[in-house]
Structures are given as C-alpha cells and as structure tokens.
Amino acid sequence: MSQPSAWNLVNPATGEVFRSIEPRSDAQMDALLAHMRAAQRQWRDVPVSTRAAICQEFVARFEGMKESVARDITLQMGKPLAQARGEVNTMLDRARAMIRLAPAALADDVQPAREGFHRFIRHEPLGIVLDIPAWNYPLLIAVNVVVPALLAGNAVLLKHSRLTPLCGDAFAEAFAAAALPPGLLASVHITHDAVSRLIQSRAVDFVSFTGSVEGGRQVYRQASAQLIDMGLELGGKDPALVLEDANFEFTVPNLVDGAFYNAGQSCCAIERIYVMRPLYQRFVDAFVAEVEKYKVGSPLDESTTIGPLAQNKTRDLLDAQIAQAIERGASLLTGGKRISGPGYFYQPTVLANADHSMDLMREESFGPVIGIMPVDTEQQGVELMNDSPYGLTASIWTEDSGRGEQLAHQTNAGTVYVNRCDYLDPELAWTGIKDSGHGCTLSHLGFGYLTRPKSFHLRTRTKG
C-alpha cells in the first residue's frame, strides 16, 4: 500500500507555505492501534487519583510551552497572537476544571442499602476514543475530549484538523513530558480515507467530531453503521436578543466582541442580532462605531484585533451572503469587502435591516460579518431566534433577570446566556440541538459520554 501524499501548511496572513506534514501509513496506524489497545487495558485499572495527577502535570508542562504553542496557532490559522495566548490560558483552566470534577463524576453510584445485597453502577472506560477537533479553537475543542477521556480511563487518538495539526502534536509532547504511559495518547496526521477506515473497521470505540454539519453527517453515517457512539459539535447561527431595558453601554461592546472575536470564526459566535425597535437605531449606530475601532492586520502584531480568515474559501461565502442581503434590502453600514494584498483578510462588516429572507440570518457565516434586525415584541424576538436549523447557543440582554430567565426557557439552544455570550463554562454541559450537534462535553455530564455504565448486583449472603 502506497504512502499517502504529504500536505502543506499555509500561513493565512501571507499565503506562504511554512511546513509540510507527512501522514502516517495504514501499516503504521495498525501498529499504533495495537499498542494503544494494550496500553488502555492497563490504564483502565489505574486509580482516578493517579490519572488526575498525570493530567495536572500535563497542565504544568503545557504552561511552559505557552509562547511556542500560541505562535503555532497564529501561523496555522491566523488568530491574533494575543488571542492565541488567551486560548492557551483558557485551555489550561478548562483542563483544571475537568480534573477537579473527575473524582465525583467517575465515582461508583452506590444504590440504597438492601439487606443481603451490594448494588452499584460503575463508570467504565470505552476503550480508544477518536477525537477529531476543528481548527478554529484548536486547543479548546481538543481539551474538551482529551483530558476527560484520559481521566475516565480511555486511550485517545487525536486526529487534528489538517489546518492545525501542530496543536495535536503539542498535546502529545506535553503528555509525554508528564509521564503519561506510552500508547495512551497519540497525535496522528492521517487522511479522511484513513479516518473512515478506522471507523469502519471498529478500530476505535467512540468518535468525537467538531466541524461542519455535512462533515458530521458523513462521520455519523460511518459510525452508526458500526454501532459506534459519537459526539458531534457542528456549528451554529447563534442569536442575541437585545431588550429595551438592556444595559446599553455594557451590551454593545460585549456583542461586538461576541461577533468579531477570532474574526467571527467560532461556532458560538454571535451571528445575528435582534433589537427591540425603540432601541434599534441607537444600538446600530453604537455598534458600528465600536466595530470601526477594531484593527485588522498581521496576527503577530500585538495591537491587531482581527487577523485573517483561516481559509480563503470563506471570503467567497461572505461575498455571496453580503451581496444577497443587500439585494434583498439590507443596508451595508461598514466593511463588506476583502482587503487587498497577501493573506485572507476581510473587513469587519455590519448590515442593518436584515431579515430571514437572507442567508446572512439563516446560514452559518463563520466570519467577521453580522446582520441586525429590529423586532416589535420580545415574543417575536424569541420566535426569530428559534427560526433556525441550528441550536448551539443564544443570548438575551436585559436588566430584568427574571424576564431573561423566562425568555431563556422559551429559547431553543443547548446553552442560553443572559447578559453574556461566546463563552464556555466548563462546569456546565456543552451541548447543541438540531443541526448544532449531538451529545455533550464538559461538566460532570461530559464524563458520561466517555464511559459506559456497568451494573454490579452482588448478593452478599446466601445462607440464613
């Protein structure tokens, strides 16, 4: 069998190739998987406290790699260096949170005493977990699975995006330095065909995939045919509803940040905004003024707030969405164009008077563009937020917390915020509905998808 072809890593800020990646062959993968299977059989019997100590050491080792890892993120997908450093810090905090949650989440569930019996449910590891993270938050998406899976007693095969493979290698390097037993975590560079082969041959026991809806459907079809469980995070078209009693000076900059951080390349980024009509024009004017403070430029410049898009093809999508929205009556208030020169840069863009006849308000943009629409009632706002094939997050902005919670209850999304957006709390379940995904990561519930329940029904007395 021939060796798969290498691929190039391209710096999206310059369009230049800076690294070539050699994928593993099928024979190399077969040998690796046999080693991982043997290592996991021993790891499953290691106490959770020992697993947690190794994960704590991983955190310490990774922290020492912060600057080099942040720079690698910037070179691979264009995130401004300051934001890349922030991602490293957030990833470490998230890992610490999952380590804290592990002992209670993985403890046996002992059932009420019954004379002559001892009954409990144990959370046993699945085996080998295949984690396929996306490129937009290459550390945060990966850590959601890698650390809890290892804490739960699994081995992890980390197949990172073709755009950000060096981030997978950083996980492997830090865990090796932390003395994780060999064979329990492997960062592999393989083709889509090789991934399909792993799933179809049942070489893995669980698959976690973060990416496009279509990509998720393809992987889900393959896994379901083999009765392999999956976790899917597939993006969103996340809305915000701004009520007339919102704290205006707080709401505007927070929503601008929620829409344009990481150049809008986040599955939980704000992608559409609904504003109560009495506040609408004031909100739009302030929003545009805040956006125009943002600086587009080299992601290695510490003052840059928006770097390039990770992929050039996204600019074609944004061009099409903006053109259609204008044709159907939206007003372009700022931005709306590619930035000439090398790299995949795009102006931060705001369109007002948007509506649901436009792809801008219905289909994922995954770039620095936002549509804003007036609404006449809060109920209309909720109905529009729910009028979407996606359901990852939504946010409501009001000074009335009771009102916010009531509207959150009516909103169809895996996470609903009040006066916050574009944020993951590791102690809360990260989950989506509809086309946004299936399953759950983070929180104590996330461990449930990386283990299987095994019931122990022990009769302790057979005489008397």
Image (tube, rainbow, N blue to C red):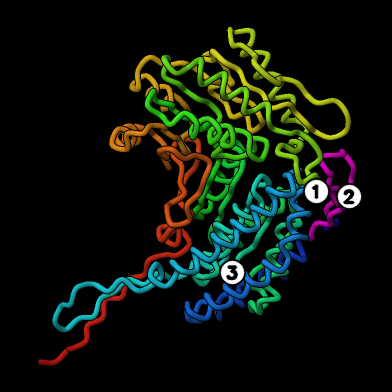
Structural distance between the alpha carbons of marks 2 and 3? 31 Å
Q: Is residue 314 above or below residue 150?
A: above
Quadrant in the picture for the N terminus: bottom right
For badge 2, the amino acid type reads: Phe
Q: Which residues are magenta?
A: 4-24
Q: Is residue 89 above or below residue 383?
A: below
Query: Residue 46, image x and y in percent?
Result: 51, 81
Q: Residue at 71% of width from left, 36% of height from top?
A: 306
| Badge number at residue 75 | 1
Q: Is residue 242 above or below residue 20?
A: above
Element marked by disc 2: strand
| Upstream in sequence: badge 1 or badge 3 | 1
In this view, the residue farthest toward the left is: 464
Question: Is residue 224 something that shows in the picture?
Answer: no
Pick whichever, 437 or 356, lies toward us.
356
* Left or right: 103 in relation to 333: left
Q: Which residue is mark 3?
A: 155
Q: Which residue is mark 2?
A: 18
**Contact? badges 1 and 2 (CB < 8 Å):** yes
For badge 3, the amino acid type reads: Ala
Structural distance between the alpha carbons of marks 1 and 3? 29 Å
Q: Is residue 223 above or below residue 377?
A: below
**Contact? badges 2 and 3 (CB < 8 Å):** no
For badge 1, the amino acid type reads: Leu
In terms of image quadrants, where is residue 190?
bottom right
